[in-house]
Each structure stands twice: as C-alpha cells, then as structure tokens.
Amino acid sequence: MKFITSFTLTGLLLCNISVMAVQVSQKAFIDNMVAQHGFDKSRLIYLLSKAKVKKSILKIMSRPIGKARPWYKYRRNFITELHIKKGVKFWRKNDRVLKQAQRTYGVPAEIIVAIIGVETIYGKNKGNIRVIDALKTLAFNYPRRADFFRDELKHYLLLTREEGLNPLAQKGSYAGAMGIGQFMPSSFRRYAVDFDNNGKRNIWTDNVDAIGSVANYFREHGWQTGQPVIEATQVRPNAIEYLLALKFEPQYPIWKLKQKGLLYHGNESNNTLGLFIDLKTEIGTAYWLGFKNYYVITRYNRSKRYAMAVYQLAQEIANRYAQTY
C-alpha cells in the first residue's frame, strides 16, 4: 500500500485549485462573450472544449529571459542572401500590387516587402499551430499575460464570425499571430483590408490582402510618406547616458538633442523630432537618430533591433531590385 505524503497532498490540492481557476476563468469569458457580443453559449463551450492546451507553448513562453543578443548577431538572422533574393522575387511577382499599396497608403514597397520577409520569409513560415489552441493556452494558463491573450481570443472569435471562418481551422504562430504578415487577431480586425475587393480579408494565402494590410497598418500608425527613417550619428561620450535615458519616442527636436550632446550633421531640420538609438556592432557601439517612421516600424514589433533589421533589409532589397531593371 502506498501512502500519500503531505507534500503530495499539497501538490494535488494546488493542481486542483489551478484547474478550477482555469474553469472559472473560461466560464467568465464565455459568459462575457454571450452577454457582450451575442455568441451562442453552447457553441462557445463546444469550441473551447475542442481547443487544446499546448504545453509546448507554455514552455516557450516560460523560458528565462536571457541577455538580448547584440545587434550584429541579431541582424544575421534577417539580413541574409536568402531574405534579399526572395524579397526581390516577391517584389517582382507582386509589383503591381505593391505599387498600388504605395500609392494608396504612402508606404514604400521595400518596407512592405521587408516586413513580410522578416515575419515569414514571404509567407513560407506562417506557423502551423491552430490559433484557437495557442490563444486558449495563453489566455487561461499563462497568468503573466492572460488578460492580453483573453482579449486576443475575444478578437479571434469575433473576426472568424465576421469573416465566416472556421475558428478551429485557422493556423498561426505559437502566440496566435496569423498569416503572411503575422497579424494578431486585434490587429486583423483593426487594420486588415480586402485589398483585392473580393469580399474577404485573407491574410493567410492572399498576397494582395497581406500587402494592403501591412501598408494600412503602417499608415494608421502614422507613417510619413517621403520622410526619413533613421540616420547614423555621433554623440559626445559624456552625453550617452543622458540620451539613452530619454523616452523611446520621437518627441525630442534635434536642436534640443544637440544641446544635450548629440553630434548630428545630417540634412534634417533642427525642429525635426527624433529619438536616440544605440546598437552594438562587431567593432563597438554605433549611434543612430531615429525619426517618426522608425518609431512606426517598432509599432509592428517593439524592438529597436527589429526595426533596424526591417529598414536595412528594405534597403538591401531595394538596391538589388533596382539593379535588375
């Protein structure tokens, strides 16, 4: 006969409490969706019962946050011959649509192409996890960001109803990002567009809608047509700490940054708003002056390294594309 120790009993009790908390949370979620959005309760119970909790996702999300890779290592994942070559090919194939998106939304073709390249290598790596599985897992089993993912689950159920999609069939990343441009459900509902006017917003397999949706996302976040993105700069050594402590937003006029030690010699007006950026290269730290458009790229992914990768990939693709004509 095996005896259950007090430690085992405590563990079982905590496990039962955890399961009960998830059940209560799901019930509250379902009740809210019924009351606020008119969903059928039995249908929601069925959908969530069919959604699976993925331990692999929780393992990924719970990994200790280590020291971020320096820029020069980070860029190696995205500024590659593969990304550039396939980017040019994607641009050629979708040239007409990219020109239309640039005219409609004011966002350069190379920026749109680079975003799609960084996100999914032009649709190759869109993710193979059911979106409802990812969002159920994180909404009810990942307390640190449960509120965020419950909101995304809400938007996912709404968008599948609005678009006439099967909630159990759509696939994406382990965090619920979807399609060629990797939109979260809330971003899909706010920014995805039916750019080919066929009555559907298809960002999973339709390059036209994916291109239009990325461009619309940028415009809605304040992209400034024809304006710069980022420029290399220098700084007085005793001013670095002060400048890096400033808020990461383009809200400081260049003249004020110069007063504090920025050594900028570019062509932008002293009244232009900017933000100070540092990135580690193989030979030391490089400094940059980012403008509104650089900040807009960070609204897609809130990382200064990500934004620089998109910008530099865009430049490489544009240069290679120009050489082919």
Image (tube, grey):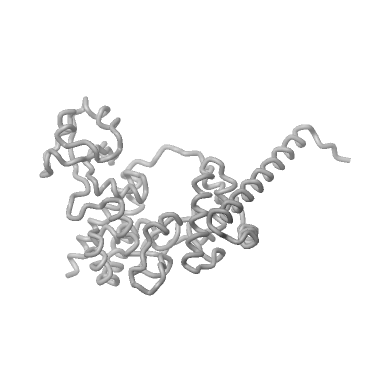
Residue 235 seen anywhere in this rendered image of the structure = yes
Q: Residue at x 74, y 40 (%)?
A: 12
Q: Residue at x 14, y 39 (%)?
A: 271
Q: Residue at x 53, y 49 (%)?
A: 150
Q: Quadrant of residue 283?
A: top left
**Marker count (numbered):** 0
Q: Nearer the viewer, residue 129 or 162?
A: 162
Residue 286 seen anywhere in this rendered image of the structure = no
Q: Nearer the viewer, residue 111 or 47?
A: 47
* Residue 79 position in % (x across, y down): 30, 54
Q: Quadrant of residue 305?
A: top left
Q: Nearer the viewer, residue 172 or 83?
A: 172
Q: Residue at x 22, y 61 (%)?
A: 318
Tell me the quarter of the image containing the N terminus: top right
Q: Is residue 313 left or right of residue 124?
A: left
* Residue 285 position in % (x across, y down): 26, 36
Q: Is residue 189 left or right of residue 275?
A: right
